Amino acid sequence: MTKLFLVPTPIGNLEDFTFRAVRILEEVDLILAEDTRTSAKLMAHYQISTPMRSHHVHNEHKMVKKWIDFLLDGKTIALITDAGTPAISDPGFLLVRECVKNDIEVDCLPGATAFVPALINSGLPCEKFVFEGFLPHKKGRQTRLKILAEETKTMVFYESPYRLKKTLTQLVEYMGEDRNISISREISKKFEETIRGSVAEVLAHFEIKEPKGEFVIVLEGK
């Protein structure tokens, strides 16, 4: 059976894993992991001994053909990332696209994705929203912020602790200090928290409390 499985992994709490995900990872011929060292902990927890190889942003372009040939040979692969659903601000799109081109079946399991609980917890409208992932670090960043300043739907971003205050400062500049915002960090983990308020209020909070962990920003539309 030739098939690529995209298997979401827990974004924090290891209990947020499905029975089906465990079964698939046990049954496939190979697991492609964003970081095999990180995924090894999850595999050990669930006693999964399937062989693993690395598949990350720095090698996915040159390795795609190898994995397509592997699949065309009648094998099965499960793709996982360090946390969450593959291809959502993580590797996965290139391999899926090549599978589609080669008529290889793709099966994406439902599971953890960080922006969904952050969006719902925000208290901001979530019937329609725009998912932006990570903003450009340099080139195109200001242009993107100018465009998003006119967006009327709720917006969702991912951000690292190292750039959070810079991003909030720029949101004040481009969106205004009174725009409502909700920021969640460490979702499903021990120190999970959500900070809500105006952009200026949340920026002031993180000027006092140094950002730690991975963040999801949910911003009110214009």
Image (tube, rainbow, N blue to C red):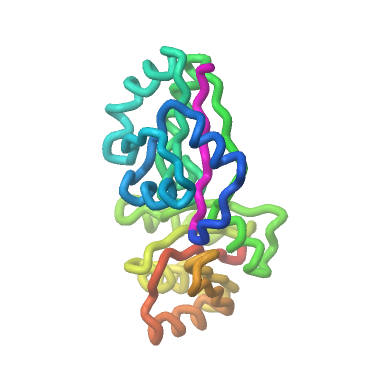
Viewer-closest of 61 and 148: 61
Dividing the picture into quadrants, the one containing residue 48 is top left
Residue 178 included in the magenta stretch of the image? no
Instruction: Write the start and end of the magenta stretch as one range.
Output: 1-11
What residue is at 46 percent from the left and 65 percent from the top?
A: 215
Check the image and report above or below for 204 versus 115.
below
Q: Is residue 164 left or right of residue 185?
A: left
Viewer-closest of 120 and 201: 120
Q: Position of residue 40 (x, y in %)?
A: 36, 47
What residue is at 34 percent from the left and 37 percent from the top?
A: 55
Viewer-closest of 191 and 209: 191
Q: Position of residue 56 (x, y in %)?
A: 33, 40
Check the image and report above or below for 52 versus 209.
above
Q: What is the count of numbered marks?
A: 0
For the C terminus, the quadrant is bottom right
Q: Which residue lies most toward the right here? A: 127
